[in-house]
Amino acid sequence: MIRLLIVDDELATIRIIKKTINFEKYDIEVIGEAYNGDEAMSYINSVNPPEIVITDMNMPVMDGVSLMRYLQENEKNVQIIVVSGYFDYSYTHAAIRANVHDYILKPIDPKALEKALSECCQKVIWSRQISIRNSDEGTKLEVKIYQIILKQTNEILKMIRYGNHIECDRCLDELYERLKHENINEDSGRAVHRVMLASIQRYLAENDMDVIKADESEQAQVHSCKDAISLIRQTAHAIIDKIEAEKSDRKRSLDEVLAYLNEHYMENIRLETIADQFHYNKEYLTTVFKKKYGLNIGEYVVKLKIEDAKRQLRYTTKNMDEIMLTLGYSDVSYFYRQFKKVEGISPGQYRKNMLSL
């Protein structure tokens, strides 16, 4: 997909742009929204930067002029569309110097914006094709063919995400039939493979997965579109198998985390220690644990402690200090607050209620 960034300090303008344009029609992905040029920089200097930027000119912190100057001085290959409430000489001069594709005044004319975006998309596609031609001389694809391949590859990536081998194969077969229908030259197989592999590699990089490196010996065996589809099929199936295996490992690992908490909740458990022990990123562990069990790790441990406290209050004669120490608490007031937060009453009241039954 073609990556688009919207830069404007007016939230209303961003919403209008997003409602005005059918991004799917142009195979556009809005990768982010920035409220000034400084915020836009994090997207522009990322691993997968925008290929088109729609920007306002008059913004706080870093305005559109400074943003365009940065893009120009650092030779960023980005198509720029200015959407501004001002027709100012300094702004238009800066836009001309930065080779801006179009300068659209607010209120936005939807047709003008859509026309500018459509033209920028064509430029991006041509730019990508030049890259392919340079890496594989003598190979070229028509813009229409290129768009067909990119759109169908996005469908294939959806099936990879879903872990669906059958639908992935169906998408690949459908692509091959469409290419035959367009009378694509079979000698273009290597270019087809490069375009599809590049899209898959971008998807893997965006999702923090190991990027598949192009195997030169395998690519040398690609002599036709049929060969290209066959090789991508192998790649897609390998990725699906890897993703599903990792899902299974994560599920098993989460169950192990849960079992560990059930056994050691009375100890001084630290999230960092658990994450290291079970080979998780701390933030990721917090997210997936809560998604699966409905509570974060801290909340789950407190729940276990309070359930144990309730059992001891009901079935033993231990005093509060003794119970508190068995659960790993050293501050009695903190223990009381935790108990009351969960049960709505103090430990003493809970014991009294249970004894009266």
Image (tube, rainbow, N blue to C red):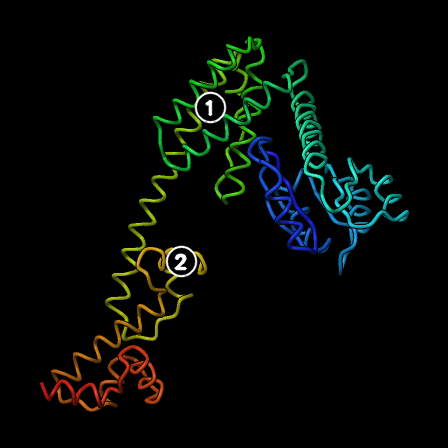
Identity of the residue drawn at 29% across and 77% down: 342
Quadrant showing the C terminus:
bottom left
Identity of the residue drawn at 41% across and 33% down: 160
CB-based contact (under 8 Å), mark 2 and mark 1:
no
Q: Percent x, y for residue 248?
A: 31, 44
Residue 197 numbered tag: none
* Above or below 262: residue 80: above
Residue occupied by mark 2: 285
Q: Percent x, y for residue 151?
A: 53, 27
Question: Relative to residue 298, is residue 124 drawn left or right?
Answer: right
Between 139 and 23, the one lying in front of the other is 23
Q: Residue furthest left?
A: 357
Number of dots carrying numbers: 2
Identity of the residue drawn at 42% across and 65% down: 272
Spatial separation of the CA atoms under disc 2 and disc 1: 33 Å
Question: Relative to residue 42, is residue 287 drawn left or right?
Answer: left
Splitting the image into 4 quarters, where does residue 71 fall?
Answer: top right
Going from the N terminus, do you reach mark 2 or mark 1 first? 1
**Secondary structure of the residue carrying numbered label 2:** helix
Residue occupied by mark 1: 232
**Secondary structure of the residue carrying numbered label 1:** helix
Q: Amino acid at mark 1?
A: Ile
Q: Percent x, y for residue 93?
A: 89, 43
Splitting the image into 4 quarters, where does residue 343 fall?
Answer: bottom left
Quadrant showing the N terminus:
top right
* Above or below 47: residue 136: above
Mark 2, other Cα within 10 Å: few <14 / some 14–19 / many ≥20: many
Between 224 and 171, the one lying in front of the other is 171
Q: Amino acid at mark 2?
A: Leu
